[in-house]
Amino acid sequence: MVLTYYCAITMIIIAYLLGSIPSAVWIGKKYYGVDIREHGSHNAGTTNMLRVLGKRAALPVFALDFLKGFVAVTLIELLKYDEHVNDVWLINLKIIAVFAAVIGHIFPIFAGFRGGKGVATLVGAITGIYPPVVLLSFGIWFVVLLISHYVSLASMVAGCCFPILTLLFPKVNESIPFVLFSFVIAALLLFTHRKNIQRLRAGTESKTYVWRPRKVRIDPDKTDTQSHDQAN
């Protein structure tokens, strides 16, 4: 039994360390020579990378943040081979691992405890528990983003819908810890986005466009030169 506790605590510590991998900070410094936390919204996350450095920088950040959350929770599955760990304890440990990974992202030990909001890591971690709820939440997030163009608003709406969706699915609504966990997650998202709420109310929140027509700038001098060359 002592070994079981030792393994469980080790897994939770690993979940925190995985969450602490500051992909946005490392990618920004390695490939662009900037600390993303000193630019834009000063947030070490996908959205700020997208606004400051573009899609090429944002996509790998999202992928890595999602993956570290997913791996942190999936590793807990190894404990199911322990005879002292039943299904109830397994899901409870997964929930603890979600919190550990997200806290690691928000307060990363590898980046001076200055991280991001943990949305991508949270999505990856919950996917490791029950993917259908995550897919529906992502659908809500995407629709709100397309309508409002605010990533923060989309994240908060999807987060608040998460406990509602949890109550609708039989496979998870029977787990009281998971239901409570879903409400805590919604509250946590609202808390980490409190500055975004202030900017939304003030009308100063930055917008993000999924599809935006590319504006081609025409240089009159260059056009005249080309026309002259063609005439000659």
Image (cartoon, helix red, strand yellow):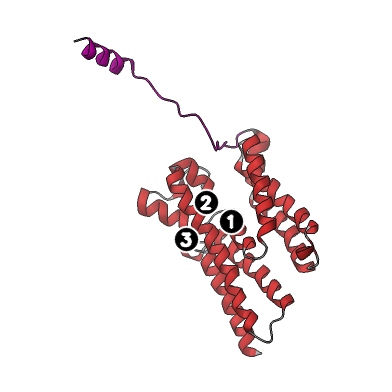
CA distance separating discs 3 and 2: 13 Å
Q: Secondary structure at mark 3?
A: helix
Task: Tell which tag, 1 or 3, sits nearer the viewer.
Answer: 1
Position in image of residue 140 (x %, y %): 68, 45
Say if 44 sits above or below 144 in the image. Answer: below
Does residue 14 appear left or right of residue 80 in this picture? left
Task: Tell which tag, 3 or 2, sits nearer the viewer.
Answer: 2
Residue at 64%, 89% (x, y): give it: 2
In primary-sequence order, the first of circles 3 and 2 is: 2
Residue 218 highlighted magenta (yes or no)? yes
Q: Nearer the viewer, residue 192 or 218?
A: 218
Q: For the residue carrying disc 2, how many other residues have a C-alpha within 10 Å: few (<14), some (14-19), or many (20+)?
A: many
Position in image of residue 26 (x %, y %): 42, 57
Residue at 52%, 32% (x, y): give it: 212
Q: Secondary structure at mark 1?
A: loop
* Mark 1 in CB contact with mark 2 (< 8 angstroms): yes
* Mark 1 in CB contact with mark 3 (< 8 angstroms): no
What amino acid is labelled 3 in the image?
A: Ala
Quadrant of the rendered structure where residue 69 is? bottom right
Q: Which residue position holds label 3? A: 111
Q: Which mark is residue 118?
A: 1
What segment carries the magenta color? 204-231
Does residue 224 appear left or right of residue 28 in this picture? left
Q: Secondary structure at mark 2?
A: loop
Q: Which mark is residue 45?
A: 2
Quadrant of the rendered structure where residue 126 is? bottom right
Say if 92 sits above or below 35 in the image. Answer: below
Residue 72 highlighted magenta (yes or no)? no
In primary-sequence order, the first of circles 1 and 2 is: 2
In primary-sequence order, the first of circles 1 and 3 is: 3
One can see residue 92 in this view = yes
Q: Nearer the viewer, residue 36 or 159?
A: 159
